[in-house]
Structure formats: C-alpha cells, structure tokens
Amino acid sequence: MTKRALPASATVSEDAGGGRLRLPAADRNKDAIATLVAGLVEDRDSGHALELASGAGQHIVEHARRSPRITWQPTEVDAARRTSIDLLAQDAGLPNIRPSIALDATAPGWSDAHGGQDLILLVNLLHLISTEDCRTLIREAGRALAPGGQLMLYGPFMRGGELTSDGDRRFHAELTGADAAIGYKDDFDITDMIHASGMELAQLVEMPANNLAFVARRFG
Ligand SMILES: C[S@@+](CC[C@H](N)C(=O)[O-])C[C@H]1O[C@@H](n2cnc3c(N)ncnc32)[C@H](O)[C@@H]1O
C-alpha cells in the first residue's frame, strides 16, 4: 500500500475512550448510508457483506443493527481502527458482526481470499487514493462478489469532470496539494471502472452534502 500524505481535513478522528475512536464524518453520514444499504439487502434471508476501510466501526454497527440476517465483515488497514471496530461491535452486542480483519483494499489479489460476497461497501476512501489504486480496488471488489452481488461506493466525486460546490473545490485542492496523485474521482470514470470489472451500474444516488453513492451489480 502506498502511504499517502493527507490534509488534516481528511483524517479527523476523535478519541471516544478505551481504544474507541469516532470519525465525525461517519456520525454525519451514517444514517443516510445505512438507509440506502438496508434497502439493498431487505429481501434477503441471509448473506455475507464485506466492508472495506471500515474506519472506527460506526457504519458497520449501524448496518448490522438494521439488517440482522446478514453477516457483516469489517476490514481496515489501520490496527488502532481495527481495535475500535471490535470494541464498538462488542459494545453493540450484535452477533452478526465478525471480528475485523486487516485488508488493504488497493492490494492486487485480495479478492482471492474474500470471494462469494453478496454485498461490498466502501465509504469515503476513493478520494484518498490514486486513480490506479481505485481501479484495482473496484476490480478486486468485482471479483470478490458472488454473481448478482452488489457493490456500494460512497463519497465525494466530480460530475462530468467538474467540482460542483465551493466546499468540494476547497477539499479537492487540499487533497491534491498534499499529494498530487489523490483527489476526487470523476463519476464517468468510476462508471467505466465498474463496467470494466464485470458489473453494471444499478443505481447512482445523490446523497446529502453533495455526495454520491454508486450501486453496482455483478453480472450473474
Ligand atoms: C476517511 S476514512 C473513512 C472510514 C470509514 N469508511 C468511514 O466512513 O467512517 C478512510 C479510511 O480508509 C482507511 N484506508 C486507507 N487506505 C486504505 C487501504 N488501502 N485499504 C483499506 N483501508 C484503507 C483508513 O485507515 C481510514 O480508516
């Protein structure tokens, strides 16, 4: 994994006590994301969901609470964050969250050990990695999905090559100022990567605060 220089605005994390962390962005966006995700699995009696870059664990606890018939697997590269994920899962007392595992979502080949997923989730990572890493991540996610499985990618994106708000222009400039290889990806490029990875774009959802959610489905 290439260690990226990130601006402070991209890495805000608070100490929530006893090894628990809290990412304020997740507190703001988790309800809207959890509502979308619950709708993706509402007709399933069972299933396996893998979250990439689970952060402090706030999202996966919410998904597991709303969709108890699904088994949720959190993953993270950062060891302190994995500790937080496991503590939040333990606090929630939900039997359908597995212990977190170390996974670099940009490493070629990770899908070999994580196949057969019904759902893969990724929130707020694509703007923090390079375009090449983004392509690898989406390709591996496509391979890790079972036929008909779904991939949900959430975050801030350009639309048709344009940054569409002052806040987005400012954040993108901070990201590229810290590392020229990272920054917002374009919605058309993401759609092309989805198509090149054996999936179709099933939904493109406008989310609060000018974010987007891509829902892709692997061909059966
Ligand atoms: C902005 S945070 C988002 C965390 C979480 N998805 C959320 O929304 O709360 C980005 C996360 O990606 C993780 N990360 C960075 N590079 C990664 C990689 N190559 N593979 C997996 N996780 C990565 C970081 O450790 C961090 O927890």
Image: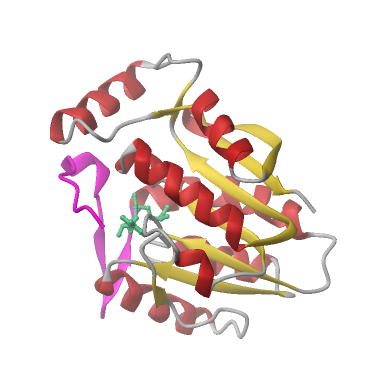
- Residue at left 61%, top 85%? 95
Q: Identify whether 144 is placed above or below 150.
A: below
Residue 54 relative to residue 220: left or right: left
Q: Identify whether 100 is placed above or below 208.
A: below
Q: In which quarter of the image is residue 184?
A: top left
Does the magenta-highlighted stretch encompass residue 188? no
Colour basis: secondary structure
Q: Position of residue 170 (x, y in %)?
A: 26, 22
Q: Where is residue 37 in the image (x, y as percent from the top left)?
A: 66, 53
* Residue 95 visible in the shown view: yes
Comparing 188 with 124, the one in front is 188
Residue 2 relative to residue 54: left or right: left
Residue 215 relative to residue 101: left or right: right
Q: Where the N terminus falls, by quadrant? A: bottom left
Q: Identify whether 37 is placed above or below 159.
A: below
Q: What stretch is highlighted in magenta?
A: 1-23
Residue 181 relative to residue 87: left or right: left
Q: Quadrant of residue 104?
A: bottom left
Counting every numbered tag in the picture gives: 0
- Residue at left 42%, top 14%? 162
Quarter for ligand 1?
bottom left
Q: Identify whether 94 is placed above or below 4.
A: below
Q: Position of residue 180 (x, y in %)?
A: 19, 30
Q: Where the C terminus falls, by quadrant? A: bottom right
* Residue 207 visible in the shown view: no
- Residue at left 45%, top 29%? 157
Comparing 125 with 55, the one in front is 125
